[in-house]
Image (tube, grey):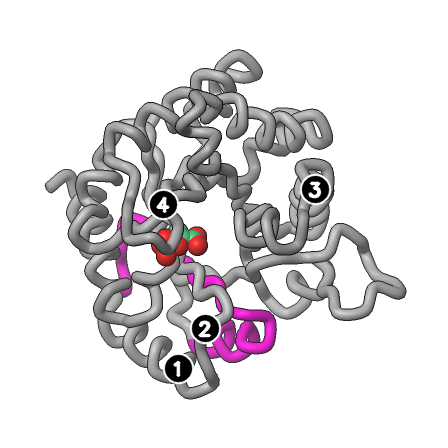
Amino acid sequence: MSRRLLVAGNWKMHGSMQFVKEMMAELNSSLPAKINYDVAVFPVYIHLYDVITNKPDHVKCGAQNLSEYDDGAVTGEVSAKMLADLGCDMVLVGHSERRIRSNEGNEEVAKKFAQALKYGLTPILCVGESLVQRQSGATQTAVWQQIQAVLDLVGIEKLGQGVIAYEPVWAIGTGESASAEQAQEVHQFIRSQLVLNDDTIARRIRILYGGSCKGSNAYELFSMPDVDGGLIGGASLTAQDFMAICQQADKLSQGV
Ligand code: PEP
């Protein structure tokens, strides 16, 4: 089954109104109108509207987080319903920076995943092991526990409506990417576990790689059989770097 590559830029807590203006101008002028892969960007909440109203139609826009609740007395949070109302397509769930800094546990992440689907947003479930877990041989256990929590809450059908991003914590923002082989090994493991639940969904779901992905390593990473694109942090912050990654996805999507 062939899966469309997805190049997703996580801007984290970066940017300004001017940055959004310039990035949208670049995407509108540099990204061809017809592409055989998908592109998405994830600005901070307050820049979402500007991105949504100025992006090319075929670029998706998502938030970096959402509340696990519908609405109510939850000061400072933003609900899935509000994101959908604004025109968001996607949302990141369980990014390691939120798991670590905001103590988001697997159950909370699973609830957020369910909320996203309830309001028609595509959740990107971020999973990944720490350096200590990798060094102690606990990569598969750590990654699968994070996915299992979502599976337990929503079931395989609904998990299959989202996207998974494998992001080894030791590779995020460090400049040290996982090798293509290391990424493939974990992606293949995830897919093989999902096959035990539903073969069709396991083959259809997109599994992105994230962690110091850039123009120079994107081709090698994305050409692995179970790597379906990337979640890009640092290299999504300039149009030049981001487009360099998109160009690699473009080549692969054309079989070059
Ligand atoms: C991320 O934060 O999702 C990420 C992959 O960051 P970076 O590309 O900077 O490692």
Q: Amino acid at mark 4?
A: Ala
Q: Which one is earlier in the sequence, the residue at label 2 or at label 1? A: 2
Question: What residue does disc 4 label?
Answer: 171
Tell me if the residue at label 3 has its CB under 8 Å from ligand 1.
Answer: no
Q: Position of residue 114 (x, y in %)?
A: 70, 42
Q: Is residue 147 above or below residue 32?
A: above
Element carrying mark 2 = loop
Which one is closest to the eye, mark 3 or mark 2? 2
Q: Is residue 190 visible?
A: no
Q: Is residue 145 magenta?
A: no
Tell me if the residue at label 4 has its CB under 8 Å from ligand 1.
Answer: yes
C-alpha span from label 3 to label 1: 32 Å
| Mark 4–mark 1 CB contact (< 8 Å) | no
Q: Position of residue 43 (x, y in %)?
A: 49, 68
Q: Nearer the viewer, residue 230 or 51?
A: 230
Residue found at x 70% / y 25%: 152
Furthest-top residue in this view: 196
- Give residue 114's mark: 3
Question: What residue does disc 1 label?
Answer: 19
Q: Is residue 197 left or right of residue 239?
A: right
Element carrying mark 4 = helix
| Mark 2–mark 1 CB contact (< 8 Å) | yes
C-alpha span from label 2 to label 1: 9 Å
| Mark 3–mark 2 CB contact (< 8 Å) | no
Q: Is residue 243 left or right of residue 94?
A: left
Q: Amino acid at mark 3?
A: Ala
- The image quarter containing residue 22 is bottom left
Which one is closest to the eye, mark 3 or mark 1? 1
Q: Which one is earlier in the sequence, the residue at label 4 or at label 2? A: 2
